[in-house]
Amino acid sequence: MAEADIALIGLAVMGQNLILNMNDHGFVVCAFNWTVSKVDDFLGNEAKGTKEIGVHSLEEMVSKLKKPCRVMMPVKAGSAVGDFNKLVLLLSCGDIIIDGGNSKYRDTTRRCKELKEKGILFVGSGVKETWPHIKTIFQSITAKVRTGEPCSDWVGDEGAGHFVKMVHKGIEYSDMQLICEAYHLMKDVLAMDQGVSGVE
């Protein structure tokens, strides 16, 4: 019976927290992991008492999803490409794959074009036609600014979402390096202890 609003593949820390966040906002998530014992562990511990559904195969996962199927998965280079292709074979025209990974924006553009030929919508957090199908979920679970506006929106076609993410990561990692270098100077050059260096 189709009962899940969305599926998420990958139960590492980020995947588990996304599922719990969606649960807190009223969405039923179908959880799958390639190491299926993680599904049972997650449902028996962190997700105990939630409405989340655990499955042990891609076929079972697709059978539990409302139409159009919405599947979020990180797409990485290497073996995960084969896993991605297995998923594509199980989906139908109008179904949606949401790439939650750190894909290169050019790969996202290529995947959008390849899947469009099959009638499958691909979000590298880009394709405008998919936005109405995922907007409610994404904007419910995302952070909000002071005015209550969500911090997620459609930013452009195909690889635009991953291009924005690439720029964001460049800024984020530069900021982290700057903090590390400033702390190093305070601790090792100026001999400041944590109590002093932590004061604003």
Image (cartoon, helix red, strand yellow):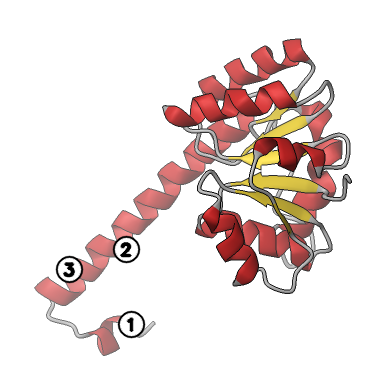
The answer to whether residue 12 is left or right of residue 193 is: right
Q: Amino acid at mark 3?
A: Leu
Taking 122 as reference, is 177 above or below it?
below
- Earlier-in-chain disc, 3 versus 2: 2
Question: How far separated are the C-alphas under marks 1 and 3?
Answer: 13 Å
Q: Residue placed at 79% from the left, 51% from the top? A: 137
Q: Label 1: how many residues lie within 10 Å, few (<14), some (14-19) or many (20+)? A: few
Q: Label 2: how many residues lie within 10 Å, few (<14), some (14-19) or many (20+)? A: few
Q: Are marks 1 and 3 in contact (CB under 8 Å)?
A: no
Q: Amino acid at mark 1?
A: Gly
- Earlier-in-chain disc, 1 versus 3: 3
Q: Which residue is mark 1?
A: 198
Q: Residue placed at 45% from the left, 44% from the top? A: 169
Q: Which residue is mark 2?
A: 179
Q: Which residue is mark 3?
A: 185
Picture coordinates of residue 77 (x, y %)? 44, 28
Q: Do we see residue 35 in this rendering?
A: yes
Quadrant of image for the C terminus: bottom left
